[in-house]
Image (cartoon, coloured by chain):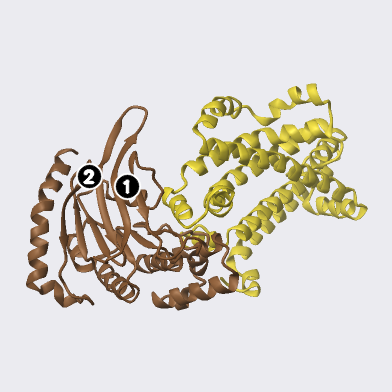
Amino acid sequence: MPSHATWLFSRELAIPLATSLILLAAWEALVHAGFLRAAFFPPPTNIVSTLLGLAAGGELWLHAGTTLGRLIASFLMALIPGTALGLAMGWWMGMRTAADPLVRLLFPIPSIAFFPVVIFYLGLSEWGLLLTAAITPFLLIAVQSASAVESLERTLLEAGRNYGASGWRLFMRVILPATLPRLFIGYRLALGVGFIVTVAVEMVAAKHGLGGFLWHSWQILRIEEMYVGLILIGFLGIFVTYGLEALADRLMPWQVDLLRLKGQR
Amino acid sequence: MGAVTKIEIRDVRHVYQSDFSSVPALASVNLTVGDGEFVALLGPSGCGKSSLLRIVAELLRPTAGSVEIHSSTELGNGRPKTALVFQEYALFPWRTVLENVVFSLEMRGVPRDERLARARKVLGRVGLQGFSDAYPHQLSGGMRQRVGIARALAAQPEVLLMDEPFGALDAQTRTVLQEELLRVWESERKTVLYVTHSIDEAVYMSDRVVLLTARPGRIKAEYSVELPRPRTMEMRGWNAYTKLSFEIWGALREEVETAMSHE
């Protein structure tokens, strides 16, 4: 792995940076030349100055922080019970038989479609928003966690038992670390889905948060602000994805090197 | 055979039950292994030898019969009855070599300093002292199985159980590891139950070869190997060695054919 200094100047960073700058410069030029209407496609320099203005005012951080907070909260609401249910489904045949049909039925329904049902019970509350954003990620994590247990290597369990682990310790020291890489497959997918639904619900039902900000700026035709919202949603997406990867690397140091060997990193 | 009995397998039967069928794997096995004895379990594939080993390891409950392992010292010394070495190594991929080796000591609550010291010593004996912090996937198959053996030795079991431990390795690595294992064993004289389907390996390593029939497995014959210790490579050229190998093959052949006709 190259050092940080060389990485900064490496092709991995330089090429995407160059393509982005070229595209933005082209956009800017096309607007100034009159080929793109500034009302619909404000020049990037205007968007950036709007962004800087909003950032200095602090409003933007409030929106971004709100969305981030909702995303984390709904993700945890999906992760904890989803993992528990999935592991139970993978471990106990009876649990699988009982829960599988329901999970299969609910899984294909887009999470946002649960919103009316949820607000019918919880009202247009913060909890309603969080719950809506958590449903599909919860099901996704449950399905993936169940399959993680099913693909658990039998000999690892035997080794754990033969070398003195049983009950809770067998779970914590063998089953959990053995399934963790596959659990994280579910977590990654769930985070992506959760992010989409969080922003979507915010657009429908929240004043605060980037989704609300974006929707509001469109309604009052502040087009620069609309683009600022889009950009921030993009960056927030990158930020949480990166955060989850950093967590995965921290929790599974043996996987970092394994994936690199397989050429996946 | 040692004077003191270590393992007593009494009338063990095993039937694999599923919702739709029942497959008899073992039909009444009786076997006594002496303290410090190296016994090879030889049989055609699917004869239930791995099942028998798992029954001794208490990973599988026999349909009938019992297994008793006599402790060398009074109970309560914390030594586990068995430690199993797997064909597919079954190392914990999330643990480094050293962490794998200390696993059983950790489970038993051995203090940290003591377990690390013991693990390092064992790693030294299998030639892995420089690899404590490596992860299993960074090692070759032969080195992984050295870790598997080190993990078993560190547990200080009453009985060492080995399930075709070198079956997944290439022929050269296998030969090297057989010799290494013999060296370690000859210095410790631990009781070993060694599952293999190789006549050559069984004769080369063990004091006694126990031949199992095709499924459902039962003991067909026993051969005591009258080769001196320490065993050396040259003995493979000895008359006694080849004679015994051919004798065993004569008996095993029928079972292999039976096993194949059932497939």
Residue linked to disc 1:
B51
Whether pointer 2 and pointer 1 mark residues with C-beta atoms closer than 8 Å, the reply is yes
Query: Please, which chain is the residue tagged with disc 1 on?
Result: B
Q: Position of residue B28 (x, y in %)?
A: 25, 42
Observer-nearest residue: A170 or B145? A170
Vertical side of A142 occupied by B240: above or below: below
Q: Is residue B51 left or right of residue A228?
A: left
Observer-nearest residue: A182 or B52? B52
Observer-nearest residue: A36 or A195? A195
Q: Position of residue A49 (x, y in %)?
A: 85, 54
Q: Colour of chain B?
A: brown
Does residue B96 appear anywhere in the picture? no
Q: Residues within 10 Å of mark 1 (few under 14, many from 20)?
A: many
| Amino acid marked by disc 1 | Ser
The residue that appears at 17% across and 38% down in the rendered structure is: B262
Q: Position of residue B3 (x, y in %)?
A: 27, 66
Q: Colour of chain A?
A: yellow
Residue linked to disc 2:
B217
The answer to which quarter of the image holds residue B111 is bottom right
Is disc 2 in the same subunit as disc 1? Answer: yes
Q: Position of residue B226 (x, y in %)?
A: 15, 69
Q: Secondary structure at mark 1?
A: helix
Observer-nearest residue: B226 or B68? B68
The answer to which quarter of the image holds residue B18 is top left
